[in-house]
Image (tube, helix red, strand yellow):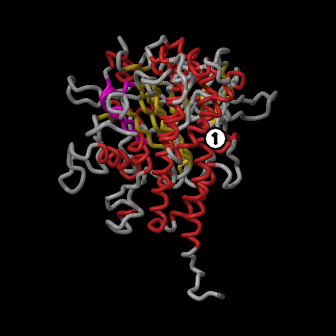
Amino acid sequence: MACTTILVGKDVSYDGSTIIARNEDSANGEFNPKRFIVVKPSEQPRHYRSVISHVELELPDNPLQYSAVPNADAKDGIWGEAGVNEANVAMSATETLTTNERVLGADPMVELTAAKGTAGEPEYEPEVPGGIGEEDFLTIVLPYVTTAREGVARLGALLEQYGTYEMNGVAFGDASEIWWLETVGGHHWIAKRVPDEAYVTMPNQLGIDEFDLDDALGDQEDHMCSADLAEFIETNHLDLSVESTTPFNPRDAFGSHSDSDHVYNTPRAWFMQRFLNPYDEVWDGPDADHSPDSDDIPWARQPDRKITIEDVKYVLSSHYQGTPYDPYGKLGDEHTRHMFRTIGINRQSQLAVIQIRPYQPQASRAIQWMAYGSNPFNALVPFYANVDTTPDYLADTTTRVTSENFYWENRIIAALCNSAFAETANAVERYQEKIGGMGHRMVTVTDEQVAQLGSIAAGVEADSAADTAVSLADSADDEASEADDDIDDIEVTDDIDNDIQPMEPGEIPTATRNGEVRDILAAANQAMADQLKAQTDELLDAVLYTTSMTMSNGFNRSDN
C-alpha cells in the first residue's frame, strides 16, 4: 500500500509523548473501507493463515487485548494496520518501501507459488506458501509484546523464519522510545531507534540513511538487525561507501534511486520537512539546499519547534500548499500543479496518530487519534485505546456507501468538496478546528475524571461514573467551564496516580485492565463519537448545499 509516515520523538513533541502516525492509502483505483475496533484475547486467532500468501503459523496462547483498524471487507485478509495493546505498545504497519535489483537478486522476495497439476498425479507440484506481509504484521506481532523493542525483535524473528513478499517499514512506540524497522529483501531487516530529539519522515522509500552495524550486532542500544546482515552486505557488495570511515548508509545500499522516486516519494519528504524546519535551510528556488527531487533529504532531524498533533495532521493532509505544486492552488500552472504525488490524496483509507503519554496513568495513557478518507477534507479525532469497545460510528463500517458511518460520510464530503474546493474550504476548516477543539477538551476532562476516580471508591456506582464522563465530554461543545465545575464538585478520596511512575513492562497490562477506568474511557469515546457524527452531518449538509448551487444545469430564474 502507498502510505506516508511521520514519527515524533518524545523530546520534540508538544507534551513529551511519543507519537507514531501514518496514512494508510489504498492502491490506485481502489478504496478500502476501514473499521476501528478492539480485539479481545478470545477473538485473537491461535492458528493464523494469511489470505494473500497462504503462510500458516501458530500464535502464542497468551495474547494481549489491542486496538486495530482492519478492512471492513475481509476478503483480502485482516490488514490491522495500527493499534495499541494493553502494555501501551503502539504499532503502525506498514509503510510500503522500494528497493533495488541488487537486493532482490541477493535475497528474493518470498512469494506464493501456486500448485501445478492435479493432486495424486506424478507431475503434481504442491503449493508453496509465501512470506508474511502488511496483511499479517499487526495481528501476529502486537498482541505479544510489552515494549517497542520487543516488537522489533518479534517481527524480526518472524521475518527471518518466514520471509516476506514485499518491502515494508514498521513503527513501534511505547512511552519511552520509538523504533523503525525496514525489511531488506526476503529475509533481512534493519531497525533504528528514533532519536528523542528528532522527527522522522517516511514517504514509501527506504529511509534510514545512517546505520551502526557494530551496535546492531552488539549492544543494540540504538540499532538492531538480522543476525547475518554484515555477511549479507559484504557477500553481495551492497555497501556503496567510498571511504572506509563513512558511516554505512542503508538508503544507498538497499533503497531505490529511480526517476519515479522524484515524482512519488522525495517531494513528500521535502514538503514535510519544509513545514517543520522552515528556518534551517533554503527550501525553494535555484539555491535550495533541498528540492523536491533531492535524494539526500535526512531521515531524521530536529524540528524548529515542538510538534503538535495538529502539525502531524497538517503534514499528513498536505497537498503542497503555498507552492506551485498544489493541485488546488493558484501558483504555478496546470503542469506544475500535477507534477508530484500529494500526501493528502484521494484514496486515503485512514490516518492513525498514536500518542503514548508518559505523564498519565497506564490505564488512560494511550490515545489513538483517527481520521477516515481523504485527509484534506476530514478531521482527526481522539479516542482512548484501552477500552473494551469502540463507537459504532467508527467500528461498524459497511462495504456499501452510507452516511451513517464515519468512513463513507468522509468519502462523500471529500468528493463534493473536491469539485468546489475554494467554495467549501472555509466550512471544512471550521469543522476541523471545531472537532479538534472538542477532542482536546474531551481528553482534558476525561483525564481529570480518571485522576479523581476515588469518587467511585467513595460510593459512586461505575455506571454513574460513566454517565458523568458522558456529560463531561458533552459539555465540550457547550460551556467548558461547567465541566470544570462538575469535576471540582467530585469528592476525591483516592487516586490512581501511583501507576504513572515507571513500571516493569509486564506489569502494565494489569494496570490498564482497570474496569472502572475503561467504563469512563469508553463513555468518553462514545460522547466524542456522538459529537463527531453531529458535526460531520452538519458539514455534509453545508457542502452538499454549496456544491448543488454550482451545478451546470442551474438557471437564474425561478418558478416563484
Vertical position of residue 313 compared to residue 467: above or below: below
| Most foreground residue, 371 or 237 | 371
Q: Which residues are magenta?
A: 192-211
Q: Which residue is mark 1?
A: 35
Q: Amino acid at mark 1?
A: Arg
Within the magenta stretch, is there residue 195? yes
| Most foreground residue, 433 or 144 | 433
Vertical position of residue 197 compared to residue 280: above or below: above
Q: Position of residue 410 (x, y in %)?
A: 58, 53
| Most foreground residue, 161 or 283 | 283
Please give the name of the residue rendered at 56% of the width and 19% of the height, measured from the top-left corner: 454
The reply to whether residue 208 is in sight is yes
Quadrant assignment, res 415: bottom right
Q: Does residue 139 appear to the left or right of 243 in the view shown?
A: right
Crowding at mark 1 (Cα within 10 Å: few <14, some 14-19, many 20+): many
Viewport quadrant of the C terminus = bottom right
Outermost residue, left side = 287
Outermost residue, right side = 120
Q: Position of residue 149 (x, y in %)?
A: 45, 19
Q: Main secondary structure of the magenta part?
A: loop
Within the magenta stretch, is there residue 173? no
Please give the name of the residue rendered at 53% of the width and 47% of the height, measured from the top-left corner: 477
